[in-house]
Image (tube, rainbow, N blue to C red):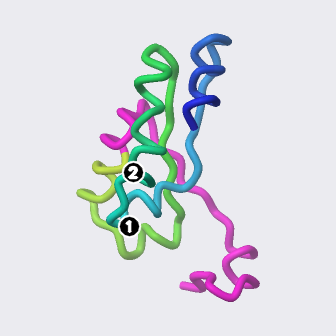
Amino acid sequence: NRTLAEAAERTNVAMGVGSQRAGLELDDEAVLESYTVVRDAAPNAFLYGNVGAAQLLEYGVDDVEEAVEMIDADAMAIHLNFLQEAVQPEGDVD
């Protein structure tokens, strides 16, 4: 994420991180830091966070706000990947 954020900053393009589910659910500083580095690397870029539609069923407003704060996001994207979730063994079919 740092390298992509640096490129976004240099080229003045927006950047979105991958799903922040791991950063919200895992108690792992290395995982969390892989997200939090983006604003440091791209202080002026338009950054958007990302959570899955399936996770919105279990997340509350506080969780989405945490995702925004995690990268100091300018916006949030909600990804829809129903087919992938349906066919992968660990997929969330809710």
Tell me which label, 2 or 1, sits earlier in the chain. Answer: 1
Q: Amino acid at mark 1?
A: Leu
Give the CA distance from mark 2 to mark 1.
Answer: 8 Å
Local crowd at mark 1 within 10 Å, few (<14), some, or many (≥20)? few
Q: In the figure, 90 relative to 35: above or below?
A: below
Residue 85 sits inside the magenta stretch: yes
The residue under label 2 is: 32
**Which residue lies most toward the front here?**
30
Q: Is residue 42 above or below residue 37?
A: above
Question: Is residue 59 placed above or below 88 in the rendered structure?
Answer: above
Secondary structure category for the residue under label 2: helix
Q: Is residue 2 left or right of residue 13?
A: left
Q: Are marks 2 and 1 in contact (CB under 8 Å)?
A: yes
Residue 35 position in % (x across, y down): 45, 43
Q: Which residues are magenta?
A: 68-94
Residue in the image at 68% along x and 67% along y: 81
Residue that extends furthest to the left in the rendered view of this protein = 62
Nearer to us in this view, 15 or 61: 15
Q: Is residue 75 left or right of residue 12?
A: left
Instruction: Please name the amino acid that badge 2 sits on.
Output: Leu
Residue at 35% x, 54% y: name it.
Answer: 29
Query: Which image quadrant: the N terminus?
Result: top right
Image coords of residue 54 (percent x, y): 51, 72
Q: Quadrant of the C terminus?
A: bottom right
Secondary structure type for disc 1: loop
Q: Is residue 89 magenta?
A: yes
Tell me what residue is drawn at x 49 percent, y 20 percent: 42
Relative placement, left or right, of 57 versus 18 is: left
Residue drawn at x 36%, y 49% is 67
Q: Which residue is mark 1?
A: 26
Residue 15 is situated, as x and y percent measured from the top left of the image, at: 59, 31
